[in-house]
């Protein structure tokens, strides 16, 4: 993955990814990570050797990787967008705006920005969409870890405050247990009502 980013041809590479795009409830969380490839040596490469798309790791592995990413990166930014904001502006528009903001806040002169799967609205730095980037690019994979761990922690706390929906177990994704909770308890303030989901169609809203 470091070799992929070195092939971009810049010393400074920023990667961005998001977590929670496909959830029924909770925020969308975007993260951006800036790497200085000239400062990454053998020790850092070994430490980052387990980097991969966050979905390929279990909870414990992601938690173990987070401090390694935080120590290696030169800058890390997390941007969160609420369920109400997603409902008001639409998921895709909200996602692109969050990714763009996170990159704008980590990028520096001479930086090339890599985004998992999408180009964001233009800004002052070069950008490239990398299809499957969270499995190819160290910077994007690092951002994937940051976004996923941050969002999971937010949903665990939400589950403590709103115990009826079990957010700490399914993190807002459309699982059978989550759909059953919606049927039994209705929707919470964290649910995205703009989604066309059978989980909502079962309710007399």
Image (spheres, rainbow, N blue to C red):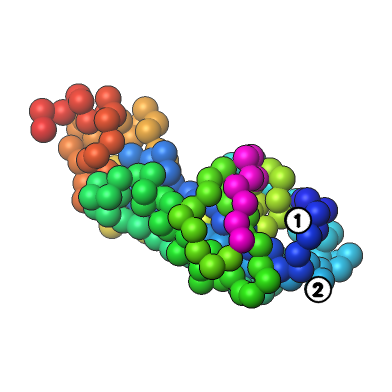
Which residue is at 27% across, 30% downward? Answer: 196
- Label 2 or label 1, whichever lies nearer to me, is 1
What span is in magenta?
126-133
Q: Secondary structure at mark 2?
A: helix
Q: How many marks?
A: 2
Main SS category, magenta section? strand
| Gap in angstroms between the C-alphas marked 2 and 1 | 16 Å
Left or right placement of residue 143 versus residue 41 in this view: left
Q: Nearer the viewer, residue 109 or 175?
A: 109
Which residue in the structure is indicated by mark 1?
Answer: 8
Left or right placement of residue 192 versus residue 203 in this view: right
- Could you say where residue 83 lies in the image, as x and y percent from the top left? 29, 51
- Reply yes or no: does residue 161 show up in magenta: no
- Could you say where residue 140 lies in the image, as x and y percent from the top left? 63, 53
- Could you say where residue 27 lies in the image, as x and y percent from the top left? 36, 53
Q: Nearer the viewer, residue 29 or 114?
A: 114
Which residue in the structure is indicated by mark 2?
Answer: 39
Which residue is at 33% across, 35% downward? Answer: 178
- Reply yes or no: does residue 129 show up in magenta: yes
How dense is the environment of label 2, judged by Cα within 10 Å: few (below 14), some, or many (20 and up)?
few
**Residue 146 in sight:** no
Left or right placement of residue 39 versus residue 54 in this view: right
- Could you say where residue 161 lies in the image, as x and y percent from the top left? 28, 57
Quadrant of the image containing the C terminus: top left
């Amino acid at each position: 993955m470091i070799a992929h980013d070195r092939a971009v041809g810049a010393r400074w590479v920023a990667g961005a990814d998001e977590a929670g795009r496909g959830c029924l409830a909770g925020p969308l969380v975007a993260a951006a990570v800036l790497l200085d490839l000239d400062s990454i040596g053998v020790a850092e490469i070994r430490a980052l050797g387990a980097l991969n798309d966050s979905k390929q790791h279990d909870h414990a592995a992601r938690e173990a990787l987070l401090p390694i990413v935080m120590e290696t990166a030169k800058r890390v930014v997390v941007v969160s967008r609420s369920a109400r904001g997603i409902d008001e502006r639409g998921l895709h528009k909200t996602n692109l705006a969050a990714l763009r903001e996170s990159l704008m806040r980590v990028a520096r002169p001479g930086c090339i920005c890599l985004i998992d799967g999408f180009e964001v609205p233009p800004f002052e730095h070069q950008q490239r969409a990398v299809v499957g980037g969270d499995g190819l690019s160290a910077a994007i994979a690092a951002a994937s870890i940051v976004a996923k761990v941050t969002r999971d922690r937010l949903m665990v706390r939400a589950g403590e405050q709103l115990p009826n929906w079990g957010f700490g177990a399914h993190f807002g994704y459309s699982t059978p247990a989550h759909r059953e909770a919606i049927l039994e308890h209705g929707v919470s303030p964290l649910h995205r009502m703009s989604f066309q989901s059978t989980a909502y169609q079962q309710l007399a809203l």
